[in-house]
Amino acid sequence: MLTKNYSTAVILMASNVLDGGKDIKDVPAEFQADVKDIINGATSVEVKPEANPTVVINPSKEAAK
């Protein structure tokens, strides 16, 4: 998840680098820092605990029993 607001151009260039269509050296210098930041964030692994499922009971159906 992105925690910073990046320009559309930076996001497109980062996705192009990640999928192998472009090398980071081909990215214009003014965008390289932000592209590297996105790539480093995309390649890091974040483990979150499993969410507990939510059980919803319809009270009107329970009352009809």
Image (cartoon, rainbow, N blue to C red):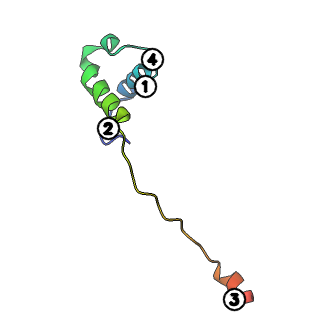
Q: CA distance from mark 4 to mark 2?
A: 23 Å
What x and y, as percent, mark residue 53? 53, 65
Which amino acid, by three-letter code, is at mark 2?
A: Asn
Q: Nearer the viewer, residue 24 or 43?
A: 43
Q: Quadrant of residue 43?
A: top left
Q: Nearer the viewer, residue 1 or 29?
A: 1
What x and y, as percent, mark residue 40? 31, 31
Q: Which residue is mark 4?
A: 20
Mark 1 or 4: in front is: 4
Query: Who comes first in sequence, dot 1 or dot 3?
Result: 1
Q: Is residue 49 above or below residue 13?
A: below
Q: Which residue is mark 2?
A: 5
Give the quarter of the figure containing the N terminus: top left
Q: Which residue is mark 3?
A: 63
Q: How many marks?
A: 4
- Whether residue 43 sits left or right of residue 55 in the image: it is left
Q: Mark 3 and 2 residues: CB-CB less than 8 Å, in contact?
A: no
Q: Nearer the viewer, residue 51 or 11?
A: 51
Label disc, if present, on residue 15 of the rendered structure: 1
Q: Is residue 62 above or below residue 11?
A: below
What x and y, as percent, mark residue 21? 46, 15
Graded by Cα atoms within 10 Å as few (under 14), some (14 to 19) or many (20 or more), the crowding at tag 4 reads few
Which amino acid, by three-letter code, is at mark 4?
A: Gly
Query: Who comes first in sequence, dot 3 or dot 2?
Result: 2
Q: Residue at x 41, y 14 (%)?
A: 22
Query: Who comes first in sequence, dot 4 or dot 2?
Result: 2
Q: Is residue 56 above or below residue 41?
A: below
